[in-house]
Image: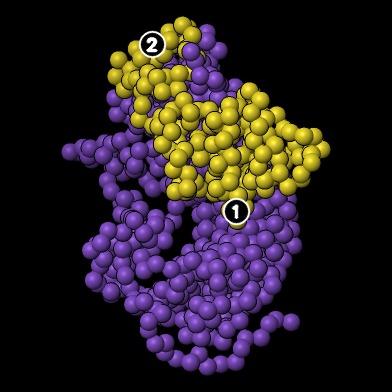
Chain colours: A purple, B yellow
Amino acid sequence: MPQPTLPPEILHHIFSIFPTDDAQGHVNDCTPLFCCTAVSRDWRSVALPMVWNQLHLLCNTDPTHLDALKRFFRLMDSGAALKNGFDYAGYIRKITISVTGFRRDLNIAMVMPTFVRIFGLLAPGQLNTLEVHIPERYPAAFSQILAALVPLMTSLKSFYLEDSHGSLHDADNLVRHLPLSLEELDLTGEHSYDDDDDMFVFAQMPDPLAQPPLLAQPPPPAPTPAVAPKPPDHTHIFTLPNLRHVTLKNQTSLPAASLAHGLQTWGARLTCLSLIFCDKLYTDAVLRALASHCPRLTSLTLVIPDRTSVTHQLITDRALADLLDACHSLESINFCNVHAVSDRFLARCAAGPAARALRSIDIQHAGPQLTGSSVVDVSGWAKLEELSVSYRWMEGWEGGTRKEMDARFVRAVRDGCKAMKLCWLGMERVVGPRKMREYWFGEDSCVDGEESDDESLSNWSDGDWWSCELEGDASDEEEEGDGDGDAVAYYG
Amino acid sequence: MSDPANITLVTMDGTTFTVPSAYLHRSKLVQDWLRSEGDKQAMEVKHVTPFVLQGVLNFCEIHAEDTSEPLADPADPTKPFEADPRDDAFRGMPDDQLLQFTMAADILQIPELVRLTAQEMASRIDGKSPDQIRAMFNPDDLAEEDVDSDNEMGEVGEEGAISK
């Protein structure tokens, strides 16, 4: 006799415990979730939409992959599925398109027809998430893939576009069609080789598909004057009123005034903002717009490229501190190479009532003006659980070779921040396990005897970052220095 | 209700259980009943056997003193599940009983118990074939046309990459 049937919401809860995968992964690997589709009618009706929820289409021209892709399309399009009322394609809510590694021999024309046929099985408006990674070199075929995606974007809530190699018009076209319903946006623009040596080396590699040189070389064509490509125009994003999470990376041409306008449009809905390698957006005007229009901001990330010198950073510590005052919900701040993060900012952040909600502060590549000197009142950090300040330690790098913060500040954090779970200041572990891996994955993640004996800085670049052990237990060491100096005054 | 500090529950066969109301402060069903019909003598809990209700009440008694914030949603991803040694009894019970406890947790709307039983069911399902799962929980069978569809998926697999 059959057991009583579990209600669909409980089955959904049970099935959601299983690892998520894309539809091809579930079907190919016969995952636990896929097995549940073949248990009973009730289980099947709950599990099938979960199996087919997301689809990852890989631009891979390996013959085996191509065959599998075509068979997968036939499965989606099978009459048997529709006959039973299970419209596999109708369950798809998320599509991801990416390329395997940095393949230069990629012939997207081989996969394009199947991709477009799959898109043809979907109804306009059924997708809520679209993730596109435009490959480095793509022929016109990829343009057709992108064009076929446009009709499916009418009800998107999340959109992720990585156009690291500047496909310009096609990326612009996708961005221009983003709907008003969009809530999450992640735009990665053209990669700057200045920030990644590996990419620079790759860009210099010869193209294996290039025509071999002829013995008798024809005369080279007359050089044509170089035409600077038109920078991408993504200003449409500043008209989308429902955005809550925004990440902009490598958007070097976006002007600060446009972002300030966008912040006004996004207003109180915006909760998370990340500006990474966006050269023109690090200004006080942006921070003031953020403070004026986005009071519910919970997370702010500013990553300034190394190429932006101190003199070109148009952010002041006063504007940063004012932002803290205005955004009372701010829980997480992540700053990298932001030279406006000074002791004055730190003092106001640590003691001010505006910082009461902060749970995580991560300051990387701190400048020389951040030492913690005279910052002893940390009463505003009652809920702070993670604090990290790191300096550049390589000789000759801007910011010097500072490794330690002021001893009085360190002591104040250790004694005053009762909720702190992990704290690294300079190269000193103040609170938390000796190994980062213990913190993130628990004590069981560290095997006895695997600790590194090398306490030199080289561990950070050459060794196992998770296992390295840099300094002795800070609590056992006698602190040096008295942290002389007057307490830093609040701003008026 | 004569004694506001206690609540009486009546199962499907008329068996009564009287326990402190505080035990059931995580049950949304009970809390709603207390607000709307608390003046009645007893709350009927249909579709739950005495054995299962006794187990649920044991769970509630064990966790009555917990200071953790009640779960609003058993699937809340921000609050990862942590196994509690006090709940080992639920991990050792037979499959059919686990199924009944899962349903009782859902009926009484106790998110913590729903999450516990769902985690245990998922761990038992993981790695099992559909036939093995059917043998464990004995749900209704697939209809014939569904089996046809499954076979079709299997045939796709026989060709190569997509296998079942």
| Residue at (39, 55) in percent of width and height | A441
Q: Nearer the viewer, residue A12 or B159?
A: A12
- Residue name at image x 52 percent, y 93 percent: A484
- Dividing the image into 4 quarters, which one contains the C terminus of chain A? bottom right
Rate crowding at label 1 as few (under 14), some (14 to 19) or many (20 or more) other CA atoms within 10 Å.
few
Q: Residue at x 65, y 69 (%)?
A: A355
Q: Mark 2 — on which chain does it sit?
A: B
Q: Is residue A78 above or below residue A373?
A: above
Kind of element beneath mark 2: helix
Q: In the displayed structure, does residue A48 sit left or right of residue A7? A: left
Could you say where residue A219 lies in the image, as x and y percent from the top left?
28, 42
Q: Which residue is at the front of the view, A215 or A322? A: A322
Q: Chain of mark 1?
A: B
Residue A82 screen position, x and y as percent: 52, 11
Q: Amino acid at mark 1?
A: Glu
Residue B126 in sight here: yes
In depth, the one of A298 and B108 nearer the eye is: B108
Which numbered marker is on residue B151?
2
Q: Amino acid at mark 2?
A: Asn
